[in-house]
Amino acid sequence: MSQTVAIPAAIPTRRGGNAIVIIGILFFIFGFTTWLNSTLIPFLKLTCQLTNDLQAFLVTTAFYMSYFVLGIPSSFILKKTGFKNGMAWGLVVMALGSLIFIPAAQARSFPLFLLGLFVQGSGLTLLQTASNPYATILGPIESAAKRISILGVCNKTAGAISPLILGALVLKGADALEAKINAATGATKDQLLDEMAARIISPYIIMALVLIGLAVAIRLSSLPEIDAEEDASAEKNNPRTSVLQYPYLVLGVICLFLYVGVEVMAGDAIGMYGRSMGMGLATTRYFTTFTLLAMLLGYITGIFTIPKYMSQQTGLKISAIAGIAFTICAQLTHGYIAITFITLLGLANALMWPAIWPLAIDGLGKFTKIGSGLLIMGIAGGALIPLLYGKLKGSPSIGNSLAFFICTFPCYLYILYYSIFGYKVGRSKQ
């Protein structure tokens, strides 16, 4: 594979070790911030008095759509700022998004909350675009999925604890408070809603301060700049003139789009799935953590098996088959058994990002940066597929269980196709 970037040879091993520690911290931040959405969905539905689940899933739409809007612009920003400064600015933008939650909570304004989420997602887009290349080049391409799995442990450990922390702060006594709010009217109801909305302010102020502190630390750190120039000599015999002439990349962007969609379905939508079956907020707030613990198990499996016992594409194929099986089982069952199978989708999803990313950008040469930008745009699957679920589950002729199946099963079928055939399409032309 043509590497995305290359660390200069003069950089000592110790600094390379420091780099992976810093990137691991950033992956922790990715996970912590991203999976707060699972708590925000029911919280904002109640405090902003949203009338349906479709509106509630605009939380994921606002957050993940930022990746689509800013995926490619982020690569141009990084060319101007450099990777280290770009990461620092990404953290600052995330802090700004967190601070928007203060006036949003005071006004109980759902559009302001969505703006804050979009700004947070914009900062994360910049961070993701800058940090993923490090994970790709800190060793041989054959073990890239293993390294990304190690960083994924940081990501999903943070994702597992973040809903617990925010849920304990903003959803404490949620079932009783929800009953009180539903029974109240007029000024009393407004007061209860204002009190609940105010719970979100302190956590997001603390988050903003932590993010700004990390931005300063990154700026002052020993994280090495990396040479993002591709090897021009490798391009002399390359007849392709556009990134779209790499079919396996285009198919990979679609694959990543669908993967992120089903990952968000298993992580963020699982709470709404339980709520639709009559489970209370006090119970469903833990479901995302269970899903992410299953993903954590999957990442650990990848660390020990790739590439020693199986290739990246084999891991992707097994993961897709598991996703198909668990989705069918969730459709055929009910209650906590169905929730268990949705939780197990976390295990099926774990190795998908680590495998899809290197398979899709392998051999792009001078088109690597734009290809990476396209892949980042594919994260928008987390914006649209849950929104489709929210729309379909409200239909009396479809309902909750079938809506979930419609939004996940075809995605896993496509991922299986990519793991067997799609990642090879067009490679012979190189």
Image (spheres, grey):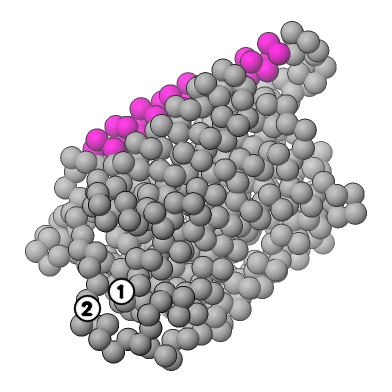
Q: Residues within 10 Å of mark 2 (few under 14, many from 20)?
A: few
Above or below, 236 against 262 in this view is below
Q: Nearer the viewer, residue 16 or 283?
A: 16
Question: Residue 52: x, y in percent?
Answer: 77, 37
Which residue was labeled with disc 1? Answer: 366
Instruction: Please give the label number shown on residue 127.
Output: none
Residue at (29% x, 32% y) in the render: 213
Question: Main SS of the magenta segment?
Answer: helix
Measured Cα–Cα span from mark 2 to mark 1: 8 Å
Q: Which residues are magenta?
A: 190-217
| Left or right relative to 197: residue 74 | left
Quarter location, residue 418: bottom right
Question: Residue 317: x, y in percent?
Answer: 56, 76
| Amino acid type at mark 2 | Ala
Residue at (74% x, 8% y) in the render: 187
Which residue was labeled with disc 2? Answer: 232
Q: Quarter holding the N terminus?
A: bottom left
Q: Nearer the viewer, residue 62 or 213?
A: 62
Q: Secondary structure at mark 2?
A: helix
Judged from this view, the residue extending furthest toward the left is 10
